[in-house]
Image (spheres, rainbow, N blue to C red):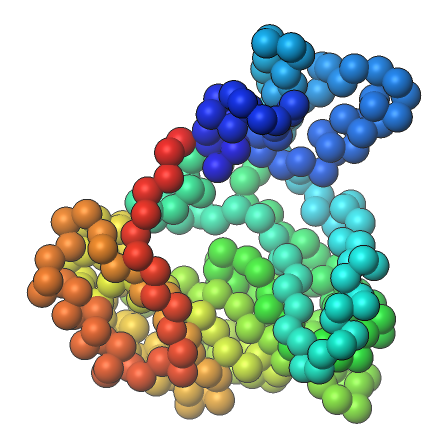
Amino acid sequence: HVSLNPEEAIRDVYDAVCIGEGEYPTLEYVTQLEEGRLPQGIPNLWIKKNSQIERNQTRGFLSDLDCLPFLDYEMWWPFIGEHHDWRFVVLLGRGCPYNCSYCSNHALRKLAAGTYVRWRSPENIAQEIAELTERNENIKEFYLEVETINVNRKWTIELCLELKHLNKSRPDPRSFGANLRLTDGLGLDELFTALREANFRFINIGLESGSERVRREILRRNYSNDTVIKTVKLAREHGLQVAFYNLIGLPGETITDFKETVKMNRICQPDWHMTYIFYPYPG
């Protein structure tokens, strides 16, 4: 929201807002404060000084995500330690190559120069998971956060091999889940085999609408209901659970379209679903 609507965000409350990626801008901002200086001239930051706003240019997208340190969860461990069977989130990459109309990715990729869709290396991801598991045995499952895990098949297979190897070294293997974006004609047998061998438990699929008309004409998601049904069937044949994202209340959606969404959920019987009411954000 801040990246796409900074004028509103900085108007009343905040001293500074970050446009785009914030790791290095935040570090530079804090460093200037520690040095007793008023922060200024930091790419990606808009900085308010009295009633004036310094609008700095954005730097290019960070090309090497492996250079970032793993997140520090030290303050959270006491809370996590009180529970068992925790699911933890680990970020795999940034950006999405698709242009779904209801998503912000098509706008976010215009914020800076450079490659927008990037992934961490499989080795780097496996190392973070290993360290988190060693730090807290109550973490039993990892949700691997990425827009879709099937954009770069070679990278995904390499990641699965790393996770499979990691689990082999443990008496109690960890399980995984991730998002999967559908496309007509996309062969998924090899991918599902690799996911299951890496101990993936589930995949999240964006059905969004059960109406093919809504998906094609409004959402820019060009795959058929037949593809959805076959994908769910194939995933279950490989021992994967399937969750659906449903999006209702869309502009241009009719009662008939809504009933198609209900119908597709009944046909596919997702193991669980996440249903959201469309809400437009400014920016």
As drawn, the residue found furthest toward the right would be 35
Q: Nearer the viewer, residue 109 or 274?
A: 274
Q: Nearer the viewer, residue 22 or 196?
A: 22
212 relative to 28 in the view: left or right: left
Picture quarter containing residue 70?
A: bottom right
Q: Residue at x 38, y 73 (%)?
A: 273
> From this viewpoint, is residue 123 visible?
no
Picture quarter containing residue 91?
A: bottom right
How many badges with numbers are in the image? Answer: 0
Picture coordinates of residue 192 (x, y %)?
Answer: 49, 78
Q: Nearer the viewer, residue 192 or 8?
A: 8
Q: Residue at x 61, y 53 (%)?
A: 93
Picture coordinates of residue 262 (x, y %)?
Answer: 21, 73
144 relative to 274 in the view: left or right: right
28 relative to 118 in the view: left or right: right
Picture quarter containing residue 36?
A: top right
Picture coordinates of residue 183 (x, y %)?
Answer: 34, 62
Q: Residue at x 81, y 68 (%)?
A: 78
Q: Which quadrant holds the C terminus?
A: top left
> From this viewpoint, is residue 215 visible?
yes
Up-down relation of residue 173 to residue 10 (above or below): below
Up-down relation of residue 34 to residue 252 (above or below): above
Picture coordinates of residue 20 (x, y %)?
Answer: 58, 34
Q: Residue at x 24, y 82 (%)?
A: 266
